[in-house]
Amino acid sequence: YVTVEMVDEVQIEYYDSNTQRIITKQDWVDQANRDKVPDYLERETESRKGTQQVFKASMGILKR
């Protein structure tokens, strides 16, 4: 499971199920998140883990 966030055709974040963490791809994104919401990466990582589980369950249903 992989998510990629883009702004104006520029990748700003990446998450995959192997590492289970968000990797910011632009310094300004990392700084903006740190300034406004210090625990942004932790909260968003947990959110994406949850979304990953929902997606996994949905794929299992579709396979049946």
Image (cartoon, rainbow, N blue to C red):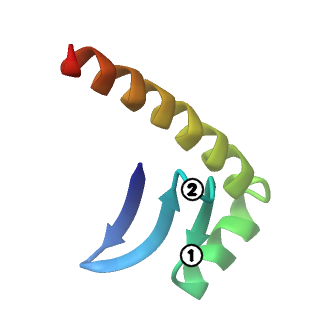
Q: Nearer the viewer, residue 44 or 20?
A: 20
- Identity of the residue drawn at 60% across and 62% down: 22
- Which quarter of the figure has residue 2? bottom left
Q: Find residue 5 and report its horizontal and vertical position in percent.
A: 38, 64
Q: Is residue 18 above or below residue 54?
A: below
Q: Find residue 50 and report its horizontal and vertical position in percent.
A: 55, 31
Q: Which residue is mark 2?
A: 18
Name of the residue lying farthest toward the front: 64
Can you say which quadrant of the picture contains the C terminus? top left
Q: CA distance from mark 1 to mark 2?
A: 22 Å
Q: Find residue 26 and report its horizontal and vertical position in percent.
A: 52, 84
- Identity of the residue drawn at 78% across and 53% down: 39
On screen, residue 40 versus residue 57, left or right, reads right
Residue 53 shows which numbered tag?
Answer: none
Name of the residue lying farthest toward the right: 38
Q: Which residue is mark 1?
A: 29
- Identity of the residue drawn at 79% across and 59% down: 38
Name of the residue lying farthest toward the bottom: 27
On screen, residue 55 versus residue 9, left or right, reads right
Q: How many marks?
A: 2
> In terms of secondary structure, where does tag 2 sit?
loop
Q: Is residue 44 above or below residue 29?
A: above
**Tag 1: amino acid:** Val
Proximity of marks 1 and 2: CB atoms separated by less than 8 Å: no
**Tag 2: amino acid:** Asn
* Numbered disc in front, either 1 or 2: 2
Query: Disc 1 or 2, which lies upstream in sequence?
Result: 2
Q: Is residue 1 above or below residue 7?
A: above
> In terms of secondary structure, where does tag 1 sit?
helix
